[in-house]
Image (spheres, rainbow, N blue to C red):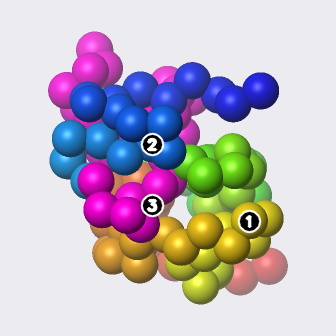
């Protein structure tokens, strides 16, 4: 069953009022509340608290939802990927990775 995704003017594949191109088909689980939002702007508009960044030690947890097939990717898998869903091949907007500092701690994680 698909997790609930929150957003403004949300469509069935998680596009929202802020990001609605053909490739804007991911939602991100916010670290602060554990809820999926279509984007940070949707979180800021709908949540009653400030956003918090995913810490490096949690980067192996599911945090990114493919709006096409509902597969959940870890932060690490999403950032290492080629802007496509590894499960269904749906193209993700490659520009989304430039917003990583809004969701994930921007400092490179420590090497194992």
Dot 3 lies on which element? loop
* Residue 37 to residue 84: above or below: above
Residue 90 placed where, x, y %? Answer: 61, 68
* Residue 37 to residue 82: above or below: above
> In the rendered picture of this protein, how many numbered marks are placed on residues?
3
Residue 2 placed where, x, y %? Answer: 69, 30
Sequence-wise first label, 3 or 2: 2
Highlighted range, magenta: 20-49
Q: Residue at x 75, y 71 (%)?
A: 86
The residue identified by callout 3 is 105
Residue 76 placed where, x, y %? Answer: 67, 68
Single out the mark in the foreground, 3 or 2. Answer: 2
> Which of the image's four quarters has the N terminus?
top right
Residue 29 sits inside the magenta stretch: yes
Are circles 3 and 2 on residues that touch, CB within 8 Å?
no
Dot 1 lies on which element? loop
The residue identified by callout 2 is 14
Q: Quadrant of residue 49?
A: top left
């Amino acid at each position: 069953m698909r997790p609930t995704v929150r957003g403004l003017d949300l469509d069935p594949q998680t596009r929202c009022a802020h990001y609605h191109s053909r490739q804007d088909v991911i939602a991100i689980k916010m670290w602060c509340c554990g809820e999926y939002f279509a984007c940070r702007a949707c979180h800021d508009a709908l949540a009653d608290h400030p956003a918090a960044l995913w810490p490096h030690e949690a980067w192996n947890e599911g945090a990114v939802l493919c709006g096409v097939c509902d597969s959940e990717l870890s932060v690490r898998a999403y950032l290492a990927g080629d802007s496509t869903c590894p499960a269904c091949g749906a193209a993700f907007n490659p520009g989304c990775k430039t917003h990583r500092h809004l969701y994930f701690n921007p400092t490179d994680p420590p090497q194992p």
